[in-house]
Amino acid sequence: KRLIDYTDPSNKKFKVNDPCKPNPFRKIDPIQLDTFRRWLAGLIDNRKPIQLPTGDASTGFFFHLQTPWKWLVDEVIRFIIKCFFLHFEILVYIHLKVIVFSPMQHIDAAFRLIRERLWLFPKTYRKKVALADTVYVACMNGRWDAFRRTSNKVKFLWDDQLTDYAKRDADHFHRGWAEVEEVYYPLNIGANHWVLVQIDLPAHMLTVYDSDQALYDDACVEQAMRPMMKMLPYFLLNVEGVTDRADLDLTTTTKPRDFDVRRLPPNVVPQTAKR
């Protein structure tokens, strides 16, 4: 099939058996939009935050989303729509140029919505992947110092809070890592730049999607990836079901081997337009 067969929501020939057909271009209910804008402007009492699945959100959370020119360029928005919602052969990458409010909360909320979409429409989005949020990445990086000081890394203790991120959780639309080939997570580099990382489990590869490669060279990116590159194989050995997979090569003859790291070149990942 041509790409347009999958990406054109008006195409009648592409049929799925999902209960509902997702349409990212569906028009917003004007009454709901007007109510939201009145709430945002304070014409409706907005002192109480809205409860999202990822936490409470005040008006500031939504004001930040209404100023994308401060943190997310139009080219990236179009790339997100094209690559994720329409085709999903390459997952979205997220690039937050300037940290103004609390991008981690926005990223986690966005990832949760994506997980829900994947879970509810499995025939539309056939590629089984898992998405980890910023909390998982922070927990992993927070254990890096203790991990590298440990002489016997095979016996390093991974607490349940961390390994639970890799387990199937229907309540939060989490696919277990034992049933997927790829895991995606957001990573902040230098406290001012977000990239998307793909964990290819069978290939033993960490792939970085970076939309502004002029900010950091390959050495800086690899340094930021070093904790996951070193810890991930040991972490996976403690995840139920993962070690039983015949398609994974987690160990060498002596010890678990590091994951390989690569950053996709600019001609593959669209770059941020300079203004």
Image: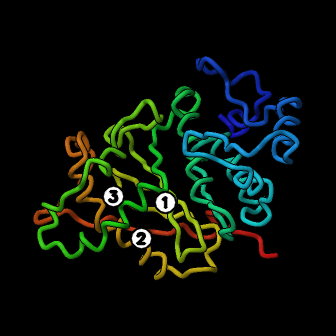
Amino acid identity at mark 3:
His
Specify which label sits upstream in the sequence, 3 or 2.
3
Q: Is residue 34 placed above or below 19 in the rendered structure?
A: below
Say whether disc 2 or disc 1 marks the residue closer to the N-terminus: 1
Quadrant in which residue 195 is drawn: bottom right
- Type of amino acid under label 1: Val
Nearer to us: label 3 or label 2: 2
The residue tagged 3 is: 204
Q: Amino acid at mark 2?
A: Met
The residue that appears at 37% across and 66% down in the rendered structure is 141
Q: Position of residue 226 (x, y in %)?
A: 36, 73
10 Å crowding of disc 2: few (<14), some (14-19), many (20+): many
- Whether the residues at callouts 1 and 3 have beta carbons within 8 Å, the answer is no
Q: Is residue 103 left or right of residue 136?
A: right
Residue under numbered circle 2: 225
> Label 1: which residue?
197
